[in-house]
Amino acid sequence: MIRSSFAHLHVAALSHPGMTGKNNEDRYAVSSFNPSTDDSRPIVFAVVSDGIGGHRAGEVAAELAVNYISQGVAESNGRKPLRIIENAIHDASQAIAAHSATKSEQEGMGATCACVWVAERKLYIAHVGDSRIYLIRKNQIRRLTEDHTWVQEAIRKGVISVEQARDHPNVHVIRRYLGSVHLPEVDFRLFLEDNEDDNEALENQGLDLEPGDVLLLCTDGLTDLVWDDEILHTLQAKPNLKDAADMLIETANQRGGHDNITVILLGVPLSGVNTQRRKSFLNWLLGEE
């Protein structure tokens, strides 16, 4: 694909290390493309990653994840978004595993990832781990992803409730991540309704976005401390995405900020997806503290 200096969506992206003094092990990137010189359809791709591992290994893993995934997307032909993202995530996972194997102090490192691909109006998503993707539409918020965690599995099986999961000692036990011995299964389910089965969620890929829709990608440093209804209220109360991103991070920090916090907001213009080029200084942004 051809990198573009313009984005057809409104973009705001921020990352904060939190209030505990730990290194920021979150990374993110937002980029915009056109498929080819003969195809000017606008594409925005965003990825967020949360690193796992001590001795600065988490930030190394997250940076490898974002760099390899972004590179894989940029070097593709843009024709099959889900296959492109899957290949890029697998390349990133192998790179992290290889790096971990050669550095004893970084052994066992890994990373989550959440990816959004918007081609004109069409939405495609993929994720591994517990970084999340939300859709805010018409005064409602919908989590499009399902965490790959012990507590989420327990909720599905009816072992614990959603309320019990918030303070459960296994809340951060991740079942799926980049850098594992075996390639992680990339999750393409896109949940739009309660009680959708997996096949129904997969069929939602390519969702038509509507004017005024907002997509949120975030790490668990946000969602551990700020509930979904509060995220919705913040987006409704603030006049623009930058102010909303600021407030989301501020709220998490006011409640302890025990982890790194990263937020990416992508907004569809109220006039619809603008296919005319509009300058965006966040067309290629690699975020780190």
Image (cartoon, rainbow, N blue to C red):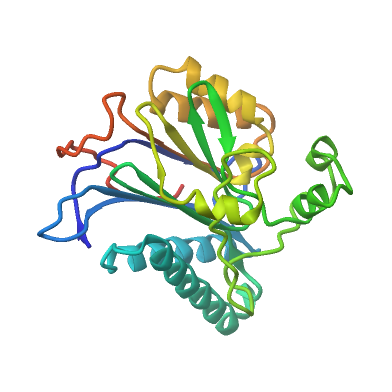
Residue 23 in view of the camera: no
Query: In which quadrant will I find the N terminus?
Result: bottom left
Residue 204 position, x and y percent, is 50, 48
Up-down relation of residue 238 to residue 258 (above or below): above
Image label count: 0
Residue 114 position, x and y percent, is 51, 53
Q: Which residue is drawn at 23% across and 47% down?
A: 42
Kindly give the residue lying farthest to the right in the view shown. Answer: 159
Residue 3 horizontal side relative to residue 137, left or right: left
Residue 218 position, x and y percent, is 54, 43
Q: Which residue is drawn at 28% across and 44% down?
A: 120
Residue 119 position, x and y percent, is 31, 49
Quadrant housing residue 73: bottom left
Residue 165 horizontal side relative to residue 176, left or right: right
Up-down relation of residue 27 to residue 84 (above or below): above
Q: Residue at x 52, y 21 (%)?
A: 139
Q: Which residue is drawn at 31% across and 24% down?
A: 270
Residue 159 in view of the camera: yes
Up-down relation of residue 212 to residue 190 (above or below): above
Kindly give the residue lying farthest to the bottom in the view shown. Answer: 102
Q: Is residue 158 or residue 230 the one in the foreground?
A: 158
Up-down relation of residue 142 to residue 81 (above or below): above
Residue 154 horizontal side relative to residue 281, left or right: right
Q: Is residue 61 or residue 238 the one in the foreground?
A: 238
